[in-house]
Amino acid sequence: MTGKTTQREGAFWIILWTVLSVALVAELVLLFLLPSGPLRWLRIFGCVLFGLSAVFGWLPIFFFRRHGGVARRKSYMYTTALVTRGPYALIRHPQYLAGDLLALAVICITQHWSVIVAGVVGIASNRLTIMKGRSRSHRQVRRWLPEVHAARPWNESHCRRVAVGSQSFSDETRLTL
């Protein structure tokens, strides 16, 4: 990579995370400033989504610490092993899902147009973060593929050579974990 490409990518991430942060903070501030929406069933659904967001946001921290080979007194981000248990057995990035669920929860609770706008912006930037991060970390994950195949035998058929249209993708170019 050249210096200009790295600078552009760095600027992109700064802008993206700023947009995501501002949208999330705006939603949470508006949650406390605006009255609850008129539809009771939607408010209740929003509270359920809020609880699910908390579960998917915090549970991965405990699973990283317990099954990720994290040294004592280190952050949960310093894992040395691939975690495929708990929420990671179902979802690739539960904390990204938690962010989307939080945005949807606040939308359902307040039912206000400004929160809907902030939530859509937040969810869109979160999705963009996932897509951009997935392409960036694709090279880093390749070294874990044999371990993932061993941990998830039901995915084995998806990770072999798959023909899509006239193209053929091998497990080196297509990750369906």
Image (spheres, rainbow, N blue to C red):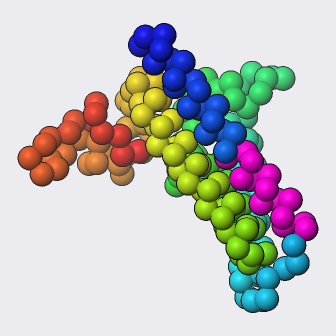
In which quarter of the view is residue 37 placed? Answer: bottom right
- Above or below residue 50? Residue 157 is above
Query: Relative to residue 62, is residue 12 drawn left or right?
Result: left
Can residue 60 be seen?
Answer: no
**Is 26 drawn above or below residue 106 in the view shown?**
above
Residue positioned 46% across, 24% down in the render: 140
Quarter holding residue 73: top right
Query: Does 28 lie within the magenta span?
Result: yes
Most common secondary structure along the magenta stretch = helix
Location of residue 118 in the rendering, given as x and y in whole percent from the top left corner: 69, 60
- Residue 24 visible within the image: yes
Return the residue nearer the eye: 111 or 151: 111
| Magenta-highlighted residues | 20-33
**Quarter of the rendering occupied by the N terminus:** top left
- Comparing 21 with 51, the one in front is 21
Q: Position of residue 27 (x, y in %)?
A: 77, 60
Q: Residue at x 40, y 24 (%)?
A: 139
Give x and y (percent) for residue 50.
Answer: 76, 66
